[in-house]
Image: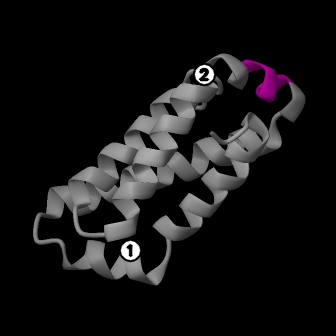
Amino acid sequence: MRTTTNLLLTMRKQVSKLYSAEVQIKIEKERDEAKRKDFVTQRKYYDDYLYQLEIQNLQGILEKMKPIEAELNGAIKSLDKSMQSVNNTVNIISGIQSVSSIVARIVPIF
């Protein structure tokens, strides 16, 4: 299990992958325009949430993250699995939403 301290690093790596050429090309090939738009929206939310986590007082954030560490770790693992195959847009979107909704409980930015 990732520790709370490592979760931010892992999340940053995921955001980088979500913006990677491989994922971008896959999303651009998605025939369903609604899925493409949803992916872009969710990817932006995830990036925004992560940014807010990074600029907040990290010690306070880390304390708030402790109780949800296992839940967040599970959501991050699920998103990792979805991104490994880059074949199912719905799974990737769902994974992003799951991680973002957990983080939103800590840092309300919207």
In the picture of the structure, the residue carrying the numbered disc 1 is 23
On the image, the x and y values in percent for residue 63 come to: 80, 21
In the picture of the structure, the residue carrying the numbered disc 2 is 68
* Residue 57 visible to an observer of this rendering: no
> Which quarter of the figure has residue 73?
top right
Mark 1 or mark 2: whose residue is earlier in sequence: 1
Few, some or many C-alpha atoms within 10 Å of disc 2 (few <14, some 14-19, many ≥20)? some
- The quadrant in which the N terminus is found is top right
The extreme front residue here reads: 1
Q: Judge whether 45 appears above or below 109 on screen.
A: below
Amino acid at dot 2: Ile
Q: Which residues are magenta?
A: 60-64
> Main SS type for the magenta part?
helix
- Which structural element holds mark 1? helix
Q: CA distance from mark 1 to mark 2?
A: 28 Å
35 part of magenta stretch: no
Amino acid at dot 1: Val
- Which structural element holds mark 2? helix
Is residue 31 shown left or right of residue 84? left
Q: Are marks 1 and 2 in contact (CB under 8 Å)?
A: no
